[in-house]
Amino acid sequence: MNTIRLTTAQALIKFLNEQYIDFDGVQQRFVKGIFTIFGHGNVLGLGQALEENPGELEVYQGRNEQGMVHAAMAYAKQKHRKQIMAATSSVGPGAANMVTAAATATANNIPVLLLPGDVFATRQPDPVLQQIEQTHDLSISTNDAFRAVSKYWDRVSRPEQLMSAMLNAMRVLTNAADSGAVTIALPQDVQSEAWDFPESFFAKRIHRISRRQPSVESVHEAAALIQSKKKPFLIFGGGVRYSEAAETFRQFAEKFNIPFGETQAGKSGIESDHPLNMGGVGVTGNSAANTLAKEADLIIGVGTRFTDFTTASKQLFSEAEILTINISEFHASKLDAAQVVSDAQAGLTAIDEALGDYSSGYKNEIAQAKEGWEKELNRLHEITWTEGFTPEVAGQLDDQLSEYRELFDSALTQTSVIGKVNELIDSQAIIVGAAGSLPGDLQRMWKAKSRNTYNMEYGYSCMGYEIAGALGAKMAEPEKEVYAMVGDGSFLMLHSELVTSLQEGKKINLLLFDNSGFGCINNLQMENGMGSFGTEFRRRNPETGKLDGPVMGVDYAKVAEGYGLKTYTVRTAQELEAAILDSKEQNTSTLIDIKVLPKTMTHGYDSWWHVGVAEVSDKESIKSAFHNKEENLSRARSY
Ligand SMILES: Cc1ncc(C[n+]2csc(CCOP(=O)(O)OP(=O)(O)O)c2C)c(N)n1
Ligand SMILES: O=C1C[C@@H](O)[C@H](O)[C@@H](O)C1=O
Ligand SMILES: [Mg+2]
């Protein structure tokens, strides 16, 4: 057997360079690059290997480990999982910082390869700097925390273990049914230890993503089920995008005249103006999709995990029968559905052939629902503050609105800003988001004018993805403008990768919606009978000892200016338009600090979200919220 003597880290980098993917006959390199933040736990091992010979891997410098993994995840999401980034951290806190992002990737079924440094395998110098000493179990390190949030976890405690670890890593990273974060913990000493690796380990490997075919029986059952229904309703999930099955889905919907709603991950798979595309469905769905979903006699979920947001906590289509087409048996089996376990394209094609000349029984309902939503959308676009104005989310902070209005000196509402942005940015531009009130507004209101232009992380809804994710999306599609749609809360949580965007010359645009608070959580607590508690950004009041002092104003444009971004502050529609147009002319990253009045986001459209309301309280409003919850629950499926 021919061997090559390399350190574990050098062997790992050499191996990553030889990984390719084959999808529909097209081959491409699988691991594009690696984000790094070096410390003593990885610099002399992986760092040395990358300095000496990175091969084709591009090496990036991250700023915050969570941020760099979010960027890696957004990259793989934008590439529809056909190409990924790796990320390496030091031991201890650097590794721990990646745990949140690992969870984000896993919740969304998006592959990322994480390579945290680990404590010494020999234990000779223990405890090393940043080592946690668990007196009951010396084998535990910070990296064990990744076990709960990874789809594959391993620790390479001897150099030769690298081979089985990496073959399993690739198995999971390229698994269309069950992917996510893969964590390979690398003890500091083992990274630098040499081994005679067999040459065969470094042979070019082509990982085929095959289109799993459905069983004949499941296709017949699905076709018979559809044929027995008059009002089927399709749900376009993220799996359709990852399977590159949008065209097949469109043809299927058109041929059988079946309208469809979109999940957050599925949105922009097909242009919003398609006559059968009803838009976002579920808790953050719009009136068109939710009305048709509610009236449907069959829900056909394609590539969807059926989260509580999609099903409105299992209440939206509680009477309909369910058919699923999903490559994952686990997700296909949800809601006690009739199941077609297959790739989205393969499943739709097979059912299409079996359906014959079926046509749904819809008459004017589809056009009517879409028209009704268009009207409502125009109304939302037009809302601006005037004296005596009632915000969309009324009856909660009505008396406080004038304070915000004076502080911000702005008449802008969130819904009108979204309309303007949608009108002004390029039709090919990509928007990125994750948390706060924006994902809901965008799922309802955003019109995707081109395909794959909506990169929303709503599996984990992790504050901090927005800006780092914009960088990842830009790396994936450098020729397009990318916009992070970010609340002030999320901006404050994590914006470190802004500096990486400047360093790499990868222009991203931040549209920062400043409403001085955790707006959506304020809505949630107040609509469930609480007061405003710990969610507005107010100073501590020395008189009450509470956070009920004046609203805080932060000049985010100044913050970003300090990093070197081109910045704008906008308070009117005219200023917003001028800023967006000017930002397009810039070569560098930009930030538009948009002062929006609180409570001016969209409100629900015929949907319910099951949240944990207190069963006991002295407050009438809480009692009533609890009663309301129980009532809604009685109308929902219980599994
Ligand atoms: C990392 C993380 N922590 C906490 C939450 C819970 N959470 C969801 S939205 C939100 C507030 C978001 O505030 P902001 O970004 O200003 O958006 P807004 O709701 O005001 O539009 C919080 C705390 C979360 N989603 N992610
Ligand atoms: O708790 C939450 C409420 C949602 O409205 C929000 O979008 C999400 O970020 C979240 O974590
Ligand atoms: Mg906010």
Image (tube, rainbow, N blue to C red):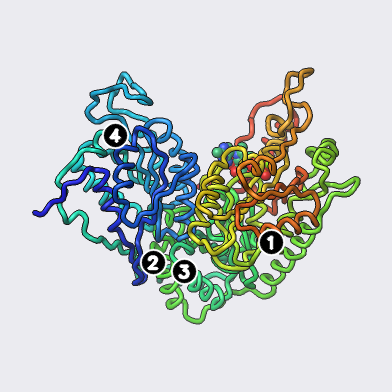
Q: Nearer the viewer, mark 4 or mark 2?
A: 4
Along the polypeptide, which appears first: circle 4 or circle 2?
4
Pinpoint residue 415: horizontal percent, then vertical percent.
Answer: 74, 54
The correct choice, above or below, for 592 with respect to 253 in the image is: above
Q: Secondary structure at mark 4?
A: helix
Q: Residue 188, labelled with which disc? A: 4
Q: Nearer the viewer, mark 4 or mark 1?
A: 4
Q: Kindly identify the amino acid type of the residue bearing the numbered disc 2.
A: Ser
CA–CA distance in space, label 3 to label 1 = 26 Å
Residue at x 77% of width, y 57% of height: 380
Q: Quadrant of the N terminus?
A: bottom left
- Asked if the beta carbon under badge 1 is closer than 8 A to the nearest atom of ligand 1, the reply is no
The correct choice, above or below, for 523 with respect to 439 in the image is: above
Kindly indicate whether the residue at mark 1 contacts the one at mark 4 (C-beta within 8 angstroms): no
Q: Nearer the viewer, mark 1 or mark 2?
A: 1
Look at mark 1 in the image and give the residue it sits on: 422
Q: Residue 218, labelled with which disc? A: 2
CA–CA distance in space, label 4 to label 2 = 50 Å
CA–CA distance in space, label 4 to label 1 = 49 Å
Where ligand 3 lies, by quadrant? top right
Q: Kindly identify the amino acid type of the residue bearing the numbered disc 3.
A: Ala
Is residue 574 visible in the rendered image? The answer is yes
Along the polypeptide, which appears first: circle 4 or circle 1?
4
Q: Kindly identify the amino acid type of the residue bearing the numbered disc 4.
A: Gln
